[in-house]
Image (tube, grey):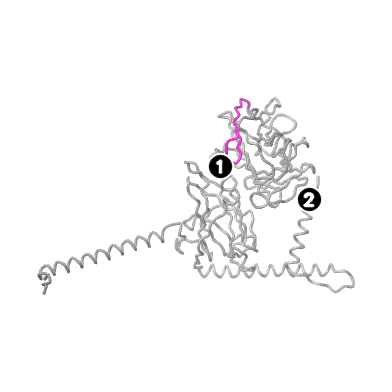
Amino acid sequence: MRKRLQLKTKNKVKLKTSVKLTIAGAAFAVTLALGFFVFDYLTRPETGKAGAEKSLPGYAFRRKVQLNISPNKSNVVFNDFPILVRLKHPDLKHIQLGGKVTHKAGYDIRFTKPDGTTILNTQIEQYNPQDGSLTAWVLLDSLAPGKAPELMLYYSNSSIQNEQANLMWTGDYAAVWHLNRDLNGSSGTARLKANTSGTLEAEGMVAKGRQYNAFNGDFADYGFSEAFQMGDAFSVCAWVNLRETGREQVILSSVGDGPGGFRLSISKNGLLDFGFVNAAGTLIRPESTNGAERIAANEWTHIAATYSKSKGEILTYVNGIIDRTFAVKDVPVKNAAALVMGRDKFVEGNGLNGLLDEVRVLHKVLPQSWLAAEYLSQGTGNSIATLFAEESLKIDQASAKQNKAATQAQNEAERSRSAERNRTQATKSNDGEAPTTISSSAQNMRDRMNSIRRVSTENSKP
């Protein structure tokens, strides 16, 4: 019989001690690693787990939002970059339609930084309470190179009854036109009222846009403003979708019947043109067509132009890429002409025949990297964001009470408006007929049609 190896007692004690130490060390390492994992998970901004103490007060829900692309392809950080966010989710429907948003215009929707508390300036361009779709501009204080923006989305706070103050387009922005509901624009926090002739609402690049028909004489006149003077640094950009080519078509012009003014247009050769009228009354614009990109018809194109007095040059861009460079010795001069969208003020033959959206004028030279980022972030599908799991928030009793009272007041106001509409409809019944009431949805449709007729009538006035 083979003898088994017998360990001496001293060796057994050493072995047992070694095994115990090994097991204890492994357990400690696992515990330490698990602790680091939990700490990292709970503190990483992308998880959205900032903790209730780091949430906006009065809100019931929030979600982490991440854009699907990184529009900044440069090697510098962009400051104060307006990013476009498109979302759609059943929870973003109105609360009366099965969702959790408490205001029918989406006023209780807020965006913050990943920290969950730093509110970002936001402008809602389009919100549909029926399907929970949202198109909004969010002002990022910084956009790092190669990083897809991350945000926190808050909703369900019925104590908020007013739209967030529009502080998106201040500073270097002279004017911004979303062209979503009408032709009016904004200059800083002031509203730019359009004196219009024609144009129709159409599907735009971002939500809705406007359709110009040159053969109907469509244009929008915004009058004179110091904000429209070029100065030493200038940028203008827009999305355009031409219905034809082969003739000159003006996008935006402050050219009058004397010196001064600028013009952004598409030439008869389909090239992007930008220039200004000097003190002698001569239109200064690119002469060479070398390397110029022809603007195709029936597709959306992002166009832009910049002027720099210090560099003495005009640059044009097509879809975020430099199109032409033009050295200029002349300088812009001030004029007293009105700014017109869709044609020159006194020239009817160069009217635009196509669609416009997101027109902007700035007293700043935007670099190519910025314009490329705008093109990428606003392009079809590029601004669609990913919504992460919903996080329920604890609402303090005071906020809960305030929310309940605000909801009741909102519902009561809606019932009163509906009852008043029904009473008004009943009084308009024909003599000899029994007064009738109509459903809220039918009334809403009728109100909408009346609004469309009213806007159409106003726009058709000279």
Where in the figure is residue 121, as x and y percent of width and height?
56, 52
Residue linked to disc 2: 458
Q: CA distance from mark 1 to mark 2?
A: 37 Å
Extreme residue toward the front, this view: 1
| Residue 188 sits in quarter | top right
Q: Quadrant of the N terminus?
A: bottom left
Under circle 1, the secondary element is: helix
Residue drawn at (61%, 29%) of the image: 326
Magenta residue check for 242: no
The magenta-colored residue range is: 315-330
Task: Give the overall secondary structure of the magenta segment.
Answer: strand
Where in the figure is residue 68, as x and y percent of width and height?
52, 53
Extreme residue toward the right, this view: 432
Q: In the rendered view, does 151 fall on the left or right side of 231? A: left
Residue drawn at (48%, 58%) of the image: 116
Residue 216 lies, with reference to residue 325, above or below; the image says: below
| Residue 19 sits in quarter | bottom left
| Residue 427 sits in quarter | bottom right
Amino acid type, mark 1: Ala
Q: Quadrant of the C terminus?
A: top right
Residue linked to disc 1: 372
Where in the figure is residue 25, as x and y percent of width and height?
24, 63
- Earlier in the chain: of badge 1 and badge 2, it is 1
Number of other residues with Cα within 10 Å of mark 1, as a class: few under 14, some 14 to 19, many 20 or more: many
Amino acid type, mark 2: Glu
Residue 349 lies, with reference to residue 404, above or below; the image says: above
Q: In the rendered view, does 108 fall on the left or right side of 438? A: left
Under circle 2, the secondary element is: helix
Between 236 and 381, the one nearer to me in the picture: 381
